Image (cartoon, rainbow, N blue to C red):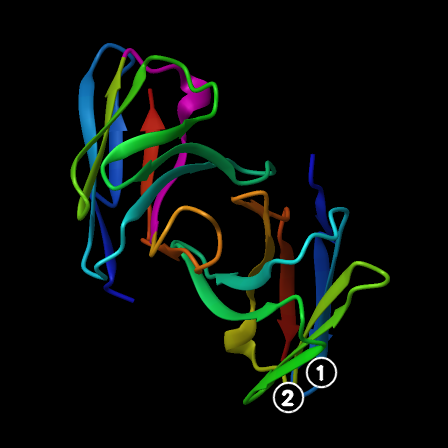
Amino acid sequence: ETGVTQTPRHLVMGMTNKKSLKCEQHLGHNAMYWYKQSAKKPLELMFVYSLEERVENNSVPSRFSPECPNSSHLFLHLHTLQPEDSALYLCASSQDSHGNQPQHFGDGTRLSIL
Amino acid sequence: GEDVEQSLFLSVREGDSSVINCTYTDSSSTYLYWYKQEPGAGLQLLTYIFSNMDMKQDQRLTVLLNKKDKHLSLRIADTQTGDSAIYFCAKTSYDKVIFGPGTSLSVIP
């Protein structure tokens, strides 16, 4: 599915680097999400944006900083990450943020912290 | 809070039917979803059902909802090797979507 596009697909970075993950949706949705998927752990919701306003922040460390400049784009800025932050980061979008419409996911960015 | 549970593994022979089960704790009226995740990819929406329905069929997929037992199942008829993936059930709960841990389906040729 090309409705939600994430770049890059793979990212290797050192703990002192700064990088950004990008997500773009072409579905005309109003809500966008960042999830973290680690091996052998449930999917973790990190951030929710509705109409470019952050509506949820699930106790995510400040080394992760989201940005939603418009309803089609979502970024996750990374700095001073830890090895335990290595995971698959998934972006999703939906028509609204109330759960009454299905979320559509991108293919994720596989992040490895050295 | 809401809990969504699934068994973690299922193994079936090619051509057989697969049944993936999901249980939940909150019984509020809502949407329930099934997603499929193949290796190296994101979650792909397979189907969804509203809680006023008992069953939904879409080609090889049949979703059954037992509201009394708070049980949701996904049946895949004539399972193929391409169906090998992780299957997530998810449920709306108080404006949030709660995902289960995923069931890894292995199809034996």
Q: Chain of mark 2?
A: B
- Check if residue B65 falls in the magenta segment: no
Displayed quadrant of residue B86 = bottom right
- Give the percent coordinates (x, y) of residue B39: 44, 57
Q: Residues within 10 Å of mark 1 (few under 14, many from 20)?
A: some
SS at circle 2: loop
Q: Write the start and end of the magenta stretch as one range.
A: A80-93
Q: Looking at this view, is A12 or A108 the one in front?
A: A108
User: What x and y, as percent, mark residue A90?
Assistant: 37, 43
Tag 1 subunit: B
**At x 48% / y 57%, what residue is drawn?**
A100
What secondary structure is found at the residue carrying circle 1? loop
* Nearest to the observer: residue A55 or residue A102: A55
Task: Say which residue label 2 marks.
Answer: B78
Q: Residue A65 at what x, y percent from top left?
A: 27, 21
Please indicate whether residue A96 sits to the left or right of residue B16 in the image: left
| Rendered residue at 21%/59% (across/down) | A28
Under mark 2, the amino acid is: Asp
| Outermost residue toward the left in this view | A69
Q: Amino acid at mark 1?
A: Ser
Relative height, residue B33 to residue A52 (above, below): below
Q: Residues within 10 Å of mark 2 (few under 14, many from 20)?
A: some
Q: Is residue A71 above or below residue B35?
A: above
Q: Which mark is residue B17?
A: 1
Quarter of the picture containing the C terminus of chain B is bottom right
Q: Is residue B94 above or below residue A18?
A: below
**Looking at the image, residue B53 lies above or below residue A57:** below
Q: Are marks 2 and 1 in contact (CB under 8 Å)?
A: yes
